[in-house]
Amino acid sequence: MAEVPRILYCHCAYAQVVPAEVKTAVLRKLCDAGVAFDAVPDLCEMSARQDPNLQNLVSGGCVKIAACYPRAVKWLFAAAKAPLPPDGAEVLNMRVQTAEEIVTALLNTGLQPNVPQGKVTAEDAPQPVAAT
């Protein structure tokens, strides 16, 4: 039996780059669907604080994330030392997709992994050398 992906909804409270009507509609439809999901105020802020909840989220198996561009979400999790599993994460982009497209994908029990691969992550990036 296939694992049911966990759902994470980001309200993008601080950057305000996601259209308000899209994020509100996605949140409302998730609530109306009666499914379990995690809602966070802002993934960018959580990443900046290296919130341990991000590590807990990715350690729990497959995840679907309603947030921003997949490449941006990948970097947010990598910066928080909680890299997304390439074959276990699907990111829905509330900046460019409709609320209906996003909710349909979130409620579908299948997973369409779309985290970009082959790029340098925060761990792989060269570290600055302290001046002497």
Image (tube, rainbow, N blue to C red):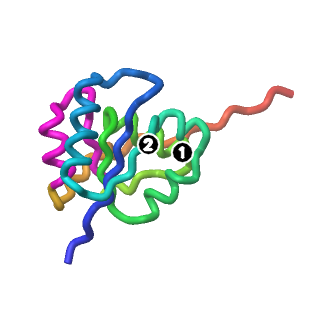
Give me the disc on residue 115. Answer: none
Looking at the picture, how far across and down is residue 4, in whole percent?
25, 66
Looking at the picture, how far across and down is residue 113, in whole percent?
25, 52
Three-letter amino acid code at the position of disc 2:
Val
Q: In the picture, residue 103 is in which quadrant?
A: top left
Looking at the picture, how far across and down is residue 119, in whole percent?
40, 41
- Specify few, some or many for label 2: CA neighbours under 10 Å numbering under 14, 14-19, or 20 or more: some
Circle 2 is placed at which residue position?
A: 40
Looking at the picture, how far across and down is residue 21, in whole percent?
23, 25
Residue furthest right as drawn: 132
Three-letter amino acid code at the position of disc 1:
Asp
Magenta residues, start to end? 89-107
Q: In the picture, residue 125 is in which quadrant?
A: top right
Q: Does the magenta-highlighted stretch encompass residue 41?
A: no
Residue visible at 16% across and 48% down in the picture: 105
Q: Secondary structure at mark 1?
A: loop
Residue visible at 55% across and 45% down in the picture: 80
Can I make out residue 33 in this image?
A: yes
Per the model, the C-alpha gap separating discs 2 and 1 is 27 Å
Give me the disc on residue 124. Answer: 1
- Is 78 placed above or below 131 here? below
